[in-house]
Image (cartoon, helix red, strand yellow):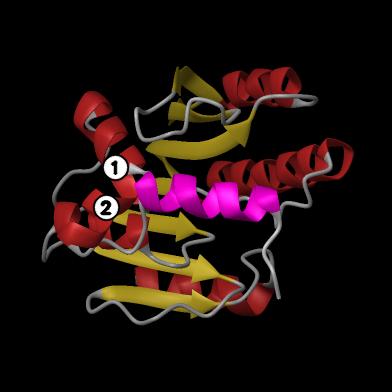
Amino acid sequence: MARSKSSQNWLKEHFDDPYVKKAQQKGYRSRATFKLEEIDQKDKLIRKGMSVVDLGAAPGGWSDYALHRVGDTGKVIALDILPMTPLTGVHFIEGDFREDEVLDQLTALLAGKEIDLVLSDMAPNMTGVDAIDQPSSMHLVELALDFAVTHLSKQGVFLVKVFQGEGFDTFLKSMRTHFNKVITRKPDASRARSREVYLLGRGLK
């Protein structure tokens, strides 16, 4: 079947992308790893010994990076409704993080430790129709915020991908009501035309 023009353009952009090439060279699971790496280097997100929960983790690029940063004394727990190729050292739970069964598994894996960092690079399956995609993506980030506020330690940190558009300002206000400090980041690895930004919340109120 012949590919559409937009599909061909996307493939060309994807394979010409320096971050895609760099990810392949380094053996990373996705170019998204560079976004987390840049934010981590700037904002000192991940430290040795931390407990990190990665929401919507598949294919695992962020979990892989976090694992190397937390070291042997830390813990990385990845959650996704999609299957994920296993990563040695990362605990993976397949399921919806709102469900009791999944939360019970998470609690068991934490074994009494508090969560220091919640990561969310989640996005819905995009249709290309903004009136559908934007509400879907805002729903996901609100779920991620609810999870972070409920489960993070008092000094915990929350990093979430958000698409600018309808609902963004309201969500930003919501972040500010829950965290002492909220900053916006647009990593170099985010494509310039993409409306995605990352909001970083520190210290629960």
**Range drawn in magenta:** 5-16
What residue sits 60% from the left and 34% below the top? 162
Question: What SS does tag 1 mark?
Answer: helix
Viewer can see residue 32: no
Instruction: Say if the magenta span includes residue 175.
Output: no
Instruction: Check whether the beta carbons of the residues at disc 1 and disc 2 lie within 8 A of each other.
Output: yes
Residue 35 circle label: none
Relative image position of residue 177 (x, y in whole percent): 63, 20
Relative image position of residue 2 (x, y in whole percent): 69, 69
Residue farthest to the front?
A: 2
The residue tagged 2 is 21
Q: Is residue 122 left or right of residue 200?
A: right
Q: Is residue 113 left or right of residue 140?
A: left
What residue sits 20% from the left and 65% below the top? 27
Crowd tier of the residue under label 2, counting other residues whose Cα lies within 10 Å: few below 14, some 14–19, many 20 or above: some
- Residue type beneath disc 2: Lys
Relative image position of residue 119 (x, y in whole percent): 44, 48
Residue 18 circle label: 1
Relative image position of residue 102 (x, y in whole percent): 59, 75
Q: Is residue 54 above or below residue 165?
A: below
Question: How many badges with numbers are in the image?
Answer: 2
